Amino acid sequence: MRLSKMFFFLLTITLFTYGNVVTAQDTDEALADFEEEKPWQVDNALDGFDEEPMEPLGDDKPTRPDERSMFDFGGAFTFSTAYSYDRKAPQTGESDHRGLSMLRGRLKLDVDIRLEDNWRVFADSSGFYDLSYRVRGQDGFTGELLNDSESELELKNAYLQGTVAGGLDIKIGRQIVVWGKSDNLRVTDILNPLDNRNPGLVDIEDLRLPVTMSRLDYYFGSWSLSAIALHEIRFNKEPVFGSPFYPVNLPPPDETRPDSWGVAPEWAAALNGVFSGWDISLYFAEVYDDRAHLTLDTRDFTTRREHSRINMIGGAINVATGNFLLKLESARFSGLEYFATPGETKERIDIMVGLEYSGITDTTVLFEGIDRIIINHDPRMADGPDEMDKDEFQTVIRVNSNQMRDRLHLVALTSLFGARGEKGSFQRLSAGYDIRDGFLATIGMLLYQSGEKSYFAAIDENDQLFFEAKYSF
């Protein structure tokens, strides 16, 4: 099963990449200058962290400031469905996740208020209801899964933004801050937690969860300096007990969390420089680890999940040359804790190298690879529940292609864990079509490969076909 899935994915990605090469009008067009094709790679080198003061995060309808009214309302309605076609019949006591796995309607609303003197207020909220649980019968699912995935209503971004003085901007409220240069892997991008409840279904840019923070940005010449205090402490949304992506048939241990509005906020700082053809960023943060580690209470031999307070110092650089964009990103983490080494803290160095090629007409090919190196690794950490080797490799290969006058959007992505994918992997193939302005329909499939990691062995049967229709207004 694993080899056939991988062969199918590689065949598909090869065919539509080759098709773009042979249909290029001529060689010069196929090797069009990288900066002309994607100027944002250089001009927006701070990856969302250094956006212009009046440009909203997540605004799907950007317009010129003089074309906007004081109040701007918008939003989107999304209908999503998925079908799990590879699952076997459940064992006694397990939920049946075969067949229809999603039948969800989601509504997103936002308001953007432009005030005088270069100030603005932006807020958006989102809610969904998944009818698939009623269709399949709620009695067959755990209460944890129904509470987590049947419905949700959440305030997303909600912030006040403006210029305090020349070169000094302020932004206060719930927001998303993107650090680093990688498009698919996380190295220095640690300020916002992720929604990991359905891994691989959407890109990382759609997974970040907003956090309430105060942020100051000071611009001087080609540089900017940022200082951030994170007042709200949030962690990743992980699959809950009873989810098809929850790896065992036992509920998790209790979790100890710091106060969401504690007296000791997380904090971070960044220095960014943007120059002709390249840019550089330096980062520092003191935050809680989004990854919970297990601890054992020797008094009653019960386990709990806890979050360590960690430090991160790192940097990232982009260099554009011709049709190529080279990405380098690295970070050193300290204060990490693991179940196998109670009472000890570990350090880890993450090193990411990426290369993006845009010399094929209307197509980009991206490679990103990362090595996470635990400096003072203990061999006991390689066993469960940590399952952490001294070196943890991950590779992402992605092809994006826009065809039919930019109305057809093709994506082929594979993410491999381990040097050769031996620890597990997943692939996503999708095709989106703009039926009309603001109306996008997407079909696709997700393939999960088993591997040495127990998590991928547990989710190997979760292959899905999915469909989404999104209307933005």
Image: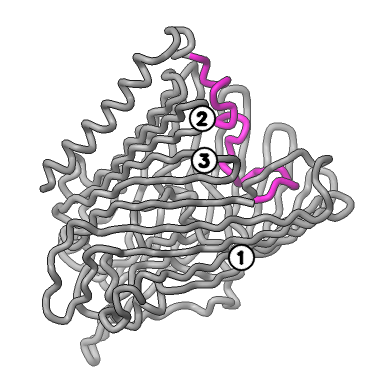
Q: Residues within 10 Å of mark 3 (few under 14, many from 20)?
A: few
Distance between mark 1 and mark 3 Cα atoms = 26 Å
Disc 3 to disc 2, C-alpha distance: 11 Å
Q: Quadrant of residue 123?
A: bottom right
Vertical order, 413 against 356 (above or below): below
In the rendering, at what x and y percent does residue 43 appear? Answer: 62, 31
Crowd band around label 2 with a 10 angstrom C-alpha radius: few (<14), some (14–19), many (20+)? few
Q: Residue at x 40, y 44 (%)?
A: 184
Of the numbered discs in the image, which one, if any, rests on residue 406?
Answer: 2
Q: Secondary structure at mark 2?
A: loop
Q: Residue 200: x percent and y percent?
A: 34, 52
Q: Earlier in the sequence, mark 3 or mark 2?
A: 2
Is residue 46 in the magenta section? yes
> Could you tell me the amino acid type at mark 1?
Ser
The image quarter in which residue 142 lies: bottom left
Q: CA distance from mark 2 to mark 1?
A: 29 Å
Identified by mark 3, the residue type is Ile
Which numbered marker is on residue 125?
1
260 or 63, nearer to the observer: 63
| Image coordinates for residue 222, horizontal then vertical, percent | 69, 32
Residue that badge 3 annotates:
435
